[in-house]
Image (cartoon, helix red, strand yellow):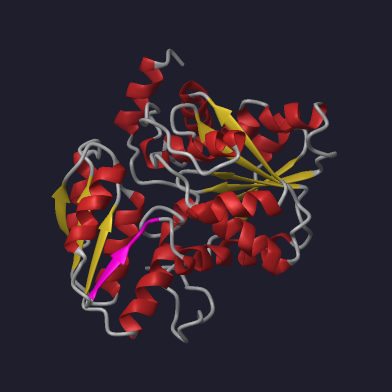
Amino acid sequence: MEEEASEQNVTGQQPLHIVTPTVHSTPLSKFAGFQVYLKLENLQIPGSFKIRGIGNLCQKAAKQGCKRVVCASGGNGGLAAAYAARLLNLPATIVLPTTTPDFVAEKLRDQEADVEVHGNVWDESNQYALKLAQDPDCLYVHPFDHPDVWEGHESLVVEAKEQLGSPPDVVVASVGGGGLLSGVLQGMQRVGWGHIPVVAMETEGADCLNVSLRQDTVSTIPAITSVAKCLGALTPCTQVFDLCKKHKVISKLCSDKQAIDACLKYADDHRQLVEPACGASLAAVYSGILNDLQSQGQLGPIKSALIVVCGGSSVTLEALDKWKKEFKL
């Protein structure tokens, strides 16, 4: 049975995402030395936070007469688009890069989507999706670069504020193309959390935001070399770059090994599987990054931290075991 959805959104309809819990983590709090709270977006029905923004985008488009949905995504964005399209009774075509696991393609077909494989990275798949979506009755779903997507992701912070009662001292989120972080930052402004710092986590080799902030201009990295393929945008959206200038955002990197280690420890601690893209945000605690930032004076005293467990469907026990052996964990 699908969990209760949140209050009506701006379209006047019930949103397609569910309200996810914000829970206190005893294991992570014990490890960190401060209170750690987890916003469990891995519990969304398509498997990640993506349904918040993409669901909002698709609902608005359907209300305006959209007849078909096209999306390029290596997994989570495509799953959210396919799920949203099915609930809205719209046909969907999802374009995947060649790096996407077969089981993700099968999940998309289970949502009644047509699947096409084109390009080695998301950016190449996206160019092909743009050609498919030239029909004016077709909605092109960009997985992270659209105001309706960011607006949908804001709901995550609105819920967390109600669930926590008092604001955290720091918020942690993973970054791929910047859709989640844009929504989180906009949501924090909306609920009066604009003064709270955010730690933006990327893996080395999928670090387009970190490179952009260091070069002080929106930059494109040459390739994705990280195992965290769902952080695999070569260029961040301009919105997230601009928001990082207005809000206190600390961009940090972890290694693939640290991200996988966080996934494995999280599975033991909370009996939930998340993919390496999500392991990046959990690594902020498991690898001591927040403690280091605090001791270096980049963060003030931390009594509580909120970690966005963004989820991800590109993970299996078999994949985690393979990564565990690969990184000798």
Coordinates of residue 52 in the picture (x, y in percent): 46, 64
Quadrant hosting residue 123: top left
**Is residue 1 toward the left or the right of residue 178 in the image?**
left
Tell me the quadrant of the picture where the N terminus can be found: bottom left
What is the tally of numbered marks visible in this picture?
A: 0
| Residue 243 higher or lower than 149, as above or below | above
- The residue sitting at the top extreme is 328
Residue at 39% x, 53% y is 47
Q: Is residue 14 magenta?
A: no
Chief SS of the magenta region:
strand
Coordinates of residue 74 in the picture (x, y in percent): 30, 45
**Is residue 142 toward the left or the right of residue 177 in the image?**
left
Q: Is residue 158 visible?
A: yes
Coordinates of residue 158 in the picture (x, y in percent): 63, 67
Residue nearer the viewer, 103 or 151: 151
Residue at 48% x, 54% y is 179
Q: Is residue 40 visible?
A: no
| Residue 67 higher or lower than 40, as above or below | below
Residue at 83% x, 31% y is 297
| Residue 167 higher or lower than 138, as above or below | above
Residue at 22% x, 76% y is 136
Magenta residue span: 138-143
| Residue 262 higher or lower than 11, as above or below | above
Coordinates of residue 327 in the picture (x, y in percent): 42, 16
